[in-house]
Amino acid sequence: MLYTVSKIADKKIQEDIEIIKKIILGKLNPRAIVLFGGFGHGGGSFKILNKKIIPLNDYDIYIIMNNKINDPILEELGKECSKALGRGGMEIVEKFQDTYDEDKFFHVDLHSLEYKKLEKLYPTQRSFDLKTSLVIWGDKNVLDKIPQIKISKSDAIRLLFNKLNHFAIAEGNSNIIKSIYAVKGLTDLCSSLLIFYDKYDSKYQEREKNFQELNVPDRLKKLVSEATKSKLFYGYSIKNVERFFLESKKWVEWTLKKILREYLKIDSEDWKVICRKMYQKLPYIYFNDYLKSKYLFLGQYYLNIMFFVSGLRKRKFLIKSLMRWRDAGLIIGTAMILYSFEEENEAERYIKKITNSRKSLKKRILELYSIYYLQKLI
């Protein structure tokens, strides 16, 4: 198998890829086109409906160029690709208030990287996975330029911030998205712990095997196995969606608390105390691996400038984000944790550092998170 665990599904994926390649090559002159994500590592998700293969993971694609391509060009090109496949091309993180629909929110997510910068990529999970992704057109050796990478432990935390965002979106939404995010909660907490303990692998199948060797509760090992099988073989289908969703959320909380307490040397189990310690300590070390020095933590202020500009594009005047050096994303993530685990008054304290909006707490957090997330920085 190449893209999935099914030869039949692979045939459909290949047909889609040919359409995408034709559109990209008609507009750009790349050095290579790389299929990333689950489909790029033999673990893409799909379902069979009326004998028809329906891909469920987005197509995550990197276009390796000699020159820089601006994001607006990539966004329009991605929409054109999605439309050509008969899919909606929307982002659920951005349109979080809409009821989830598999076609409406399936999209072709295009990224561009300059060839000369491949050897200087940040030590992220994304860079690690990119090195072993599938080149679907062009220079087959292009990814050899990426060095061997040890993933920053900050990525383990980032993954779990994203899961809390997904849970908040799914609550009150369709059972389909609840099922998908319940499964992803468990497969991503698996990735998070493997990153944290330097045992991560790019393939879902290998991650699940490695996870069984960790010193974690047997119930969690069983759930991660169930979630991995659901993702690979059953199109995210699970029995008793509500129960599985709540259990996934509980174990994501367990994992996040375990990592934060160990990483920041926190004794308390109380989320209010943990988050206060996070706010005090995490900004000083979270970006060290990216900035290449523990003394350059103030450089994260640049992210606040970018966040402010991104807000303007969404007609949000987030001037308060420019009044502090701590990364707005970490503050929003802290509020997300507290909201998720029923500490809403405390969450309010943090979110007010970013916005004076009077919308509901949940809506404020999700709006701010979507602005930050869609910069592709977290």
Image (tube, rainbow, N blue to C red):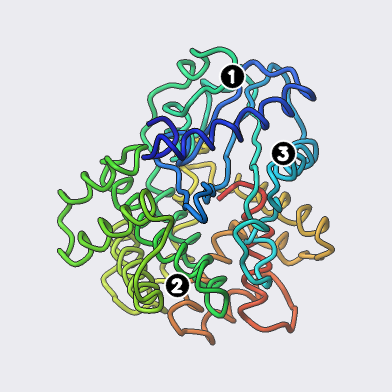
- How many numbered tags mark residues here? 3
Q: Position of residue 277 (x, y in %)?
A: 41, 68
Report x, y in % for residue 200: 31, 41
Q: Nearer the viewer, residue 150 or 177?
A: 177
How far separated are the C-alphas under marks 2 and 1? 48 Å
Look at mark 2 in the image and give the residue it sits on. 276
Instruction: Specify few, some or many for label 1: CA neighbours under 10 Å numbering under 14, 14-19, or 20 or more.
Output: some
Rendered residue at 35%/49% (across/down): 191
Amino acid type of the residue that numbered disc 3 sits on in the rendered structure? Cys
Q: Nearer the viewer, residue 314 or 51?
A: 51
Q: In the image, residue 68 lies at what x, y percent?
A: 73, 25
Q: Position of residue 129 (x, y in %)?
A: 43, 34
- Can residue 293 be seen here? no
Reading the image, the residue beneath label 3 is 81
Residue, far bottom: 345
Dot 3 or dot 2, earlier in sequence: 3
Q: Earlier in the sequence, mark 2 or mark 1?
A: 1
Find residue 202 and report its image quarter: top left
Give the amino acid type for the residue marked by disc 2 in the picture: Arg
Circle 3: is it few (<14), some (14-19), or many (20+) Cα within 10 Å? Answer: many
Q: Secondary structure at mark 1?
A: strand
Q: Is the residue under label 1 in contact with that under label 3 (CB below 8 Å)?
A: no
Q: Is residue 133 above or below residue 199?
A: above
Side of 376 relative to 224 (left or right) = right
Quickly name the residue at label 1: 137
SS for tag 3?
A: helix
> Which residue is painted at 68% across and 42% down in the image?
85
The residue at the point 73 percent across, 67 percent down is 320
Instruction: Judge left or right: residue 155 versus residue 376.
Output: left
Answer with mark 3 or mark 1, whichever residue precedes in sequence: 3
User: Which residue sits at x=67%, y=20%?
Assistant: 65
Distance between the Cα atoms at labels 3 and 1?
16 Å
